[in-house]
Amino acid sequence: MQSKAMALKNKVQSIVVTTMWRKNAFLVSSSRTFATGYDDNRILKSPSSLVSLDFPDVWNYSSSTNCTESSTHKLASDHTARVIDGKQVSEEIISNVATEVTRMKKTIGEVPGLGVILVGERKDSLTYVRNKITACEEAGIKFKLAEFSDNCTEDEVCDAIMRFNADPSFHGILVQLPLPQHLNEEKILNVVKLEKDVDGFHPVNMGNLAMRGREPLFVPCTPKGCVELLIRYGVEIMGKKAVVIGRSNIVGLPASLLLQRHHATVTIVTALTPNPEEITRDADILISGVGVPNMVRGSWVKPGAVVVDVGTYPIEDKSCEQGYRLIGDVCYEEASRVASLITPVPGGVGPMTVAMLLYNTLESATRKYNFV
Amino acid sequence: MQSKAMALKNKVQSIVVTTMWRKNAFLVSSSRTFATGYDDNRILKSPSSLVSLDFPDVWNYSSSTNCTESSTHKLASDHTARVIDGKQVSEEIISNVATEVTRMKKTIGEVPGLGVILVGERKDSLTYVRNKITACEEAGIKFKLAEFSDNCTEDEVCDAIMRFNADPSFHGILVQLPLPQHLNEEKILNVVKLEKDVDGFHPVNMGNLAMRGREPLFVPCTPKGCVELLIRYGVEIMGKKAVVIGRSNIVGLPASLLLQRHHATVTIVTALTPNPEEITRDADILISGVGVPNMVRGSWVKPGAVVVDVGTYPIEDKSCEQGYRLIGDVCYEEASRVASLITPVPGGVGPMTVAMLLYNTLESATRKYNFV
């Protein structure tokens, strides 16, 4: 596994930054100002394209469907973390959204509307969209699904978004990610009208989330759900050490920005972080959104920490009714014996994402109609 | 000093998040899902306005004009860090920009143009603008200054920006910050055309700097200058622990985002971080942009670390020709005996900011004319 990480690193070094990265960090070889070895005539030595630095995070851990207790880590046998019940919290939020929707309908004769774009037939995407439809029905939010085949064109998708943009009965637009490879995600997401970007993925919303003194119109649903859970369970964020594992646009990045807004001291761990467990072990609040089942072991968790697990993966299990069960990034059996609070998978962050989507859609309609 | 921090914290707690923050973190009092004490009917318990969380960072350290060696910290008496010569690097960059500008003029008969908005008569702003004018003249970049009195209106400033937006001979527009209190910085900066935002402060540019797979049109000059120095001095960033002290929109935030782009493991230390020195002491790369002279002591620095000091403050010193000298965030005398590389003040990051501004302006013109 080590060799895989090294290979990736070497590949990156050779492709992207051949002339720039030096093997011996902090070791400067000569008395000249500039390191030698630049063979190009560019004015700056830093990479001209930042996207070129943007290769996928490949975690140096094999995913595992089972985690057994690490023998090197002493677990308190009598301790079990309190479980953060995301399902219960999300039900309460959806029920409160429903009450507001009813009041809006009675008062001004309008209801919030959500338009969803679904491309292709990925099973997980279908499940997520189905959950969103059910929740919208429960809350009285108007829902419309625009479905496209796997081989549709960018224009078809953009046209559908523009129709939702133009239709005043839709206050939120969601493009179910990931999109098929041949579609330009950036281009498509940028078509979503800022005022209807209930997922908060537009760069203006992300920039305003990042910048001090600014306020995004919408905060991405998953991180917003995580922080709502923390607050509801009485977790102090201000001044605490928070570690976010992973830096995806939909989880890690906005989670790190939102935790900074709440005045945590935030560290972002990536696939290129050597010995991530040394950093996570120092976290009061640990949020994981990496995509590797059971990567975060009990030994990665500081005793008494709060653990929020954003990962969700179906694994085959014939003992379950549906033939599969869901597991997360965190080895729950181990981590729950070290943490003070922990989100389960399923029933933790997942339902909160849906509840936040409904909330953001309601908020958008409320803002549009100036409904108080 | 401790009481000041506590007072601030208490103030924040009482004003902003009275019902949300709990005194005993990680201690949940009852078996109910929700912490008690919420007296409002909002659907979410997290703050409805994120800006309300956005109070100024007040550092729990008094600024000092002199720093003496900390007696509790053992300094290697025979070690001195290599000095990062930002002045020399910036001169090389400006000279290379000048060459490109000459080539552009010869080839297509155009030169890059920079429009600068200056409001009021702050001495530091005047100095910065003067430095920029001098550098532009040196590089052959057209420069126009739009000056306004301290009591000008928002519309006057916005009109000037719009004239620069519309004028094809200007490829960059810079609003010298800070603006007087009565002007809305966000509104004014948002008027700057994205394609001319050479400071990179537009939320779209910041959002695209933050997001994976995206690329901002411009990276803010100061952090870009810091990273350029690191690369030129052979500092490996990938996989290293980088700590950024401060989270301003112009330094801390974009520096943390840019270091993440270069695959550092980044921690952002704020004024509310308890014992920041425990975190900075673990940094391979330490960037400080806080605004407190000599706050970062030698004992805050890991032996062998690279220290980049973004602060610049004039302090009275009659022994100097001008009657004052400049110092930074970092206690240089102490830190230079611990670090492996260090930027001085003056002559470190400061001149690089100007060089990057010229580079961004050239890049903007190059992009517009598709000049290769």
Image (tube, coloured by chain):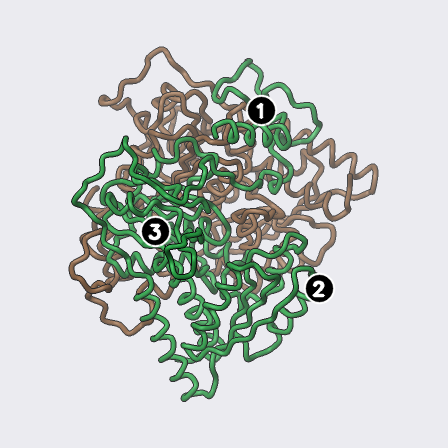
Chain colours: A green, B brown
For residue A314, side relative to residue A45 (left or right): left
User: Along the polypeptide, which appears first: circle 2 or circle 3?
Assistant: 2
Q: Amino acid at mark 2?
A: Asp
Which residue in the structure is indicated by mark 2? A155
Q: Could you say where residue B267 lies in the image, as x and y percent from the top left? A: 39, 39
In the displayed structure, B208 sits above or below B296; it is: below
Please identify the quarter of the rendering in which residue A226 is found: bottom left
Please identify the quarter of the rendering in which residue A165 is found: bottom right
Which residue in the structure is indicated by mark 1? B88
Q: Mark 2 belongs to which subunit?
A: A
In the displayed structure, B162 sits above or below B329; it is: below
Callout 1: helix, strand or loop?
Answer: helix
Residue at (31, 66) in percent of width and height:
A89
* Residue A160 visible from this viewpoint: yes
Q: Mark 3 belongs to which subunit?
A: A
Q: Amino acid at mark 3?
A: Val
